Image (cartoon, rainbow, N blue to C red):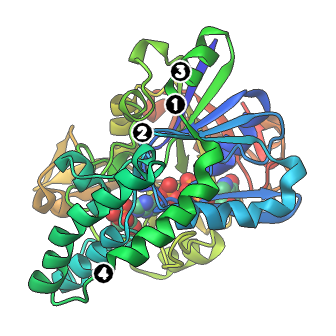
Amino acid sequence: MAAVVVVGTQWGDEGKGKYIDILSADADYVVRFSGGNNAGHTIVHDGVKYALHLVPSGILRKGKTCIIANGVVIDPAVLISELNNLSKYDNELAELIISDRAHVIMPWHIELDSLQESYRGNAGLGTTRRGIGPAYADKAERSGIRMCDLMDPDLFREMVHSTIKVKNAIIEKVYGGKPLDAEKIIDDYLGYAEKLRPYVRDVNSIIHRAIENGKTVLFEGAQATFLDLDFGTYPYVTSSNPIAGGVCTGAGVGPKMITEILGVFKAYTSRVGSGPFVTELNNEVGNQIRELGHEYGTTTGRPRRCGWLDVVMLKYAARLNSLTGLCLNHLDTVGKLDSIKICMAYKLDGKIIDYYPSNLKELARCEPVYEEFESWKDIDISKVNRYEMLPPAAKKYLKRIEESIGVPIKYVGVGPGREQVITM
Ligand code: GDP
Ligand code: IMO
Ligand code: MG
């Protein structure tokens, strides 16, 4: 029996999709448990790049089952378009199942996400404007619409009519926006409902049966620890719980059923959107990392902010997620720099601190304490597939990371491809 959780340990885009794709070769099920199409997970297979937003990253494995669980918020138009894009690989695809308890992103969520961001101006959170925050807010407020409601045309129609009154009042009277047309929304969404109906069912029983029958289930995290609603750099976070605990509520799995928790990170740090970033590099090295690592958003195309690896964050992530193993990516990218730095501690007002500040003003005052490492600029490691073949400087760098976090590194990425991974 194996229930393996894969989570992001930084601010997202660590390469979770790549590891899910690789690990799904030996799994039976892949389950997305949180977030929505704010996620952008990249898989590179035979030189072809696939960007997935809602469909789990095990989809390119025929014979496996991919599940979108209750904790995900689903924009049906985006999901259908993603399925259409994948349809040319029809013979190579895994089966897809969608939870009837997952909440639906409605046009008012997208509209309000955008209006709220514009209203905040310079103080904006830098959301993806995909309606994620408003959809989760409605779920908590108990005015959300679930997939099972969408599958019931009469009920859905009623729910749209009763909800849209309040939403249009806010759109028009608070933000000065244009009201939405209920009949058009009902028409569009009932069309989506018919396309998605074959996939929608109760998934919790399927996940439980799989684990009880000794199958391997992979839980695919979206977003990351420092975007977590409770433990991230609030309010510059997403509106769900991407940490490993999110699997329990997002897929209905008890904590004792989880057997392994892998934390994915890049050999540097990146962030899209606003919020504090202690090791950010607003200089030539930051630009170099962005270009070498192709750090442009998979979902919005925005340039990602880049900086050095931050072990203070990773140690905190190891604790919050109970990490049993680490998956490092972009060892190839940092090797191309003149030298590499790792932030080992934070200094706040002249003193080393042993916690991750919740107060963002305090966090902004933290100064990184760096250790510097030699790079291996003249050696191309992108085809290395065994640890022994890595240059000594890369080995020294990996050892220092592992010992400072206190969690074993299980996999090392040396390129975006499925095969560009060293198993430790
Ligand atoms: P996710 O959201 O965590 O799945 O990550 P993204 O797909 O948004 O971003 C990760 C980016 O890094 C993608 O463009 C990947 O193809 C790329 N990538 C992943 N691992 C490696 C690696 O080891 N080396 C290099 N050069 N690129 C990688
Ligand atoms: P993956 O799964 C990176 C960021 C947004 C913004 C904040 C809130 O690809 O790692 P939201 O639209 O969720 O309300 O935006 O969270 N964000 C991500 N950043 N990777 C992601 O997903 C992200 N999902 C959300 O940029 O700062
Ligand atoms: Mg991403």
Q: Quadrant of the C terminus?
A: top right
Q: Amino acid at mark 1?
A: Asp
In the picture shown, does residue 332 fall above or below 344? below
Amino acid type at circle 2 is Arg
Corner quadrant of residue 180:
bottom left
The reply to whether discs 2 and 1 touch (Cβ–Cβ < 8 Å) is yes
Please name the residue shown 50% across and 25% down the image.
204
Q: Position of residue 145 (x, y in %)?
A: 34, 52
Q: Which residue is mark 3?
A: 205
- Label 4 residue SS: loop
- Marks 4 and 2, how far apart in space? 25 Å
The residue wearing badge 4 is 180
The answer to whether mark 4 and mark 3 are in CB contact below 8 A is no
What x and y, as percent, mark residue 192? 56, 62
Residue neighbourhood size for the residue with mark 2, other residues' Cα within 10 Å, grouped as few (<14), some (14–19), many (≥20): many
Q: Which residue is mark 2?
A: 101
Q: Mark 3: few, some, or many residues within 10 Å (few <14, many ≥20)?
A: few
User: Which residue does the numbered mark 1 point to in the structure image?
Assistant: 202
Q: Nearer the viewer, residue 359 or 257?
A: 257
Say the numbered circle drawn on residue 334.
none
Write down the quadrant of residue 404 in the picture. top left
Q: Quadrant of the N terminus?
A: top right
Check disc 1 and report its element: helix, strand or loop.
loop
Give coordinates of residue 126: x percent, y percent. Answer: 32, 74
Q: Nearer the viewer, mark 4 or mark 2?
A: 4
Residue sitting at x 51%, y 31%:
202
The answer to whether marks 1 and 3 mark residues whose Cβ atoms lie closer than 8 Å is yes
User: Does label 1 point to a residue whose CB lies under 8 Å from ligand 2?
Assistant: no
- Distance of mark 2 from mark 1, alpha carbons? 8 Å
What kind of residue is marked 3? Answer: Ser
Disc 2 C-beta below 8 A from ligand 2: no
